[in-house]
Image (tube, grey):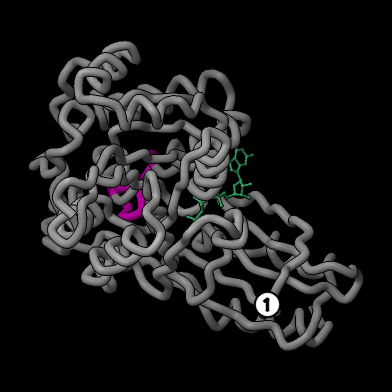
C-alpha cells in the first residue's frame, strides 16, 4: 500500500436541496471525459438512494443510507472508503454528504479513514442555495441557519448556486454574507452548478498550485473565521471549524446541529393523480424544505423522479432499469408528520 499514491477525496457539502447531486453528476462526466475513473460515496438520510439514480451506472458507488455519516454511521465511513478504493481503484472519490451533515464530523471521518487506507482530502466544496441562505440569514438564531453557516465556514470552495432565482442585488448580498462567514474560500456564482470543472484538477495539483488558485480567486488573505484548508488541504483540523459552531452561542455543546431535522418516508400503495399531487406539494408547510421520490401517476405512463427543494418542484420522467418502489421522502424540521400522512392518505384514496 505504501508506494501507492493517496486517492484524492473531495467532500461535497451544502444544505438540503442546494445542488450537490447536480454538481456531482457534472463532475463525474468531467472526470470520465478525461479518461479518469471517479467513485462516489453517497450518504442519504432516508432509506432509499434517489440521488444515486442520477449517477451513471458505470460509476462505482457506495451507499450509506438511513442516517447521517457525520454522526450515526460515521464509524463505517473508513471501512466503506477502504473497500471502495481497494475494489475499484478509482482516480478520485467524491463524498456526497446528506444536506444535514455537519462538515467537521465529515472531516474527522475522512481523517479516520486515512488510517485505514491511503486517502487525501483535497477539498470541501460547499454548494449554497442563494435565496435560501438569504432567507435563513434573517433568522440568524435558528438551527438550520447555524448548520448552513458551519457548512460555509468549513468550505475550501463555495459554489453560490441557483443564481437564476435571485436578483443581481440579492446575489451580491449573498456573496458578502458568504465572505463574512468564510474569508478564504473562492466563491463561484452558478446556475445548476455550471462551473469551470478544471477547478478539480487544480485542487488535486500540488500545494503551490492550490495557493496560486486561491490567490487568483482573490481568496488568499487569511479570513479570521474560516477554516484554513484551502491553504493546507492535507491538514484538515481547524479550531475555527469546531463542533456545533453557533450552537455554542446558545449555550449548547451538542455535536449534531441537525438533530432537529426530521425525515418521513412514505411508500405509495397505488398510483396517484398528478394534479392532486402537485396541489398537495403546493400545500406543504414551510417546515418541510426538501422532498424527493419516485412517483407513479394514474394519468401518465412512465414513472417520475420527483424533486422539491425550497418551494420549487421538479418532475423528471425516468425509465428505471430495475423494479423501484413508489416512494416519497420528506425532510424538514419539526413538521407535523400526522398532517402530512393525512394529506398523503387523501391523495391515495383520490379524495385530495
Ligand atoms: N432553479 C434552479 N434549480 C436548481 C439549480 N441547481 C439545482 N437545482 C434543482 O434543485 C433541486 C435539488 O438539487 P440537487 O442537486 O438534488 O440538490 P442536493 O443538494 O443534492 O439535495 P439533497 O441531496 O437532498 O441535499 C433539483 O430539482 C435541481 O434540479 C439552479 O441553479 N437553479
- Tell me where residue 152 sits by quadrant: top left
Which residue is painted at 42% across and 72% down in the image?
65
Does the image show residue 13? no
Q: Determine crowd level at label 1: few under 14, some 14-19, many 20+ residues with C-alpha closer than 10 A.
A: few
Determine whether 336 is above or below 254 in the image.
Answer: below
Residue ranking furthest to the front:
3
Q: Nearer the viewer, residue 208 or 32?
A: 32
**On-image quarter of the N terminus:** bottom left
Query: Residue 32 magenta-drawn?
Result: no
Q: Nearer the viewer, residue 327 or 207?
A: 207
Q: In the image, is 75 to the left or to the right of 166?
A: left
Which residue is painted at 68% across and 77% down in the image?
324
Q: Position of residue 187 (x, y in %)?
A: 39, 25
Does the image show residue 281? yes
Which residue is painted at 56% across and 19% down in the image?
168
Which residue is painted at 68% across and 53% down in the image?
313
Q: Position of residue 332 (x, y in %)?
A: 47, 64
> Which residue, given by chain and number where applicable, does mark 1 sit on?
324
Determine whether 122 is above or below 183 in the image.
Answer: below
Q: The magenta stretch spans which residues?
A: 137-146
Q: Is mark 1 within 8 Å of ligand 1?
A: no
Q: Nearer the viewer, residue 302 or 63?
A: 63
Q: Judging from the image, what secondary structure is the residue with disc 1 in?
A: loop
Q: In the image, is 149 to the left or to the right of 346?
A: left
Q: In the image, is 264 to the left or to the right of 86?
A: right
Q: Position of residue 167 (x, y in %)?
A: 58, 24
Query: Residue 141 magenta-drawn?
Result: yes
- Tell me where residue 268 sits by quadrant: bottom right
Determine whether 229 is above or below 94 in the image.
Answer: above
Amino acid at each position: 500500500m505504501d508506494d501507492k499514491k493517496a486517492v484524492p477525496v473531495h467532500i461535497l457539502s451544502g444544505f438540503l436541496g442546494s445542488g450537490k447531486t447536480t454538481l456531482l453528476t457534472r463532475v463525474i462526466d468531467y472526470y470520465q471525459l478525461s479518461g479518469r475513473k471517479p467513485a462516489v460515496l453517497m450518504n442519504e438520510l432516508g432509506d432509499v438512494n434517489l440521488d444515486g439514480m442520477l449517477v451513471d451506472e458505470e460509476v462505482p458507488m457506495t451507499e450509506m443510507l438511513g442516517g447521517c455519516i457525520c454522526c450515526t454511521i460515521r464509524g463505517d465511513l473508513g471501512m466503506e472508503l477502504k473497500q471502495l478504493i481497494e475494489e475499484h481503484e478509482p482516480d478520485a472519490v467524491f463524498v456526497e454528504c446528506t444536506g444535514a451533515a455537519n462538515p467537521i464530523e465529515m472531516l474527522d471521518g475522512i481523517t479516520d479513514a486515512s488510517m485505514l487506507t491511503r486517502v487525501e482530502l483535497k477539498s470541501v466544496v460547499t454548494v449554497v442555495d442563494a435565496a435560501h441562505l438569504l432567507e435563513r440569514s434573517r433568522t440568524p438564531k435558528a438551527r438550520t441557519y447555524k448548520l448552513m453557516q458551519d457548512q460555509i465556514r468549513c468550505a475550501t470552495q463555495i459554489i453560490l448556486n441557483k443564481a437564476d432565482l435571485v436578483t443581481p442585488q440579492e446575489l451580491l448580498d449573498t456573496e458578502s454574507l458568504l465572505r463574512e462567514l468564510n474569508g478564504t474560500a473562492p466563491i463561484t456564482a452558478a446556475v445548476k452548478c455550471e462551473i469551470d470543472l478544471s477547478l478539480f484538477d487544480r485542487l488535486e495539483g500540488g500545494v503551490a498550485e492550490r495557493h496560486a488558485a486561491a490567490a487568483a480567486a482573490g481568496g488568499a488573505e487569511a479570513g479570521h473565521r474560516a477554516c484554513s484548508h484551502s491553504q493546507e488541504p492535507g491538514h484538515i483540523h481547524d479550531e475555527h471549524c469546531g463542533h456545533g459552531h453557533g450552537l455554542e452561542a446558545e449555550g449548547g455543546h451538542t455535536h449534531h446541529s441537525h438533530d432537529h431535522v426530521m425525515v418521513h418516508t412514505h411508500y405509495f400503495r397505488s398510483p396517484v393523480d398528478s394534479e392532486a399531487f402537485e396541489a398537495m406539494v403546493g400545500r406543504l408547510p414551510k417546515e418541510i424544505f426538501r422532498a424527493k421520490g419516485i412517483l407513479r401517476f394514474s394519468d401518465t405512463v412512465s414513472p417520475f423522479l420527483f424533486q422539491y427543494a425550497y418551494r420549487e418542484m421538479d418532475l423528471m420522467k425516468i425509465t428505471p432499469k430495475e423494479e423501484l418502489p413508489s416512494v416519497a421522502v420528506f425532510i424538514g424540521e419539526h413538521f407535523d408528520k400526522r398532517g402530512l400522512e393525512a394529506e398523503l392518505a387523501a391523495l391515495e384514496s383520490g379524495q385530495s
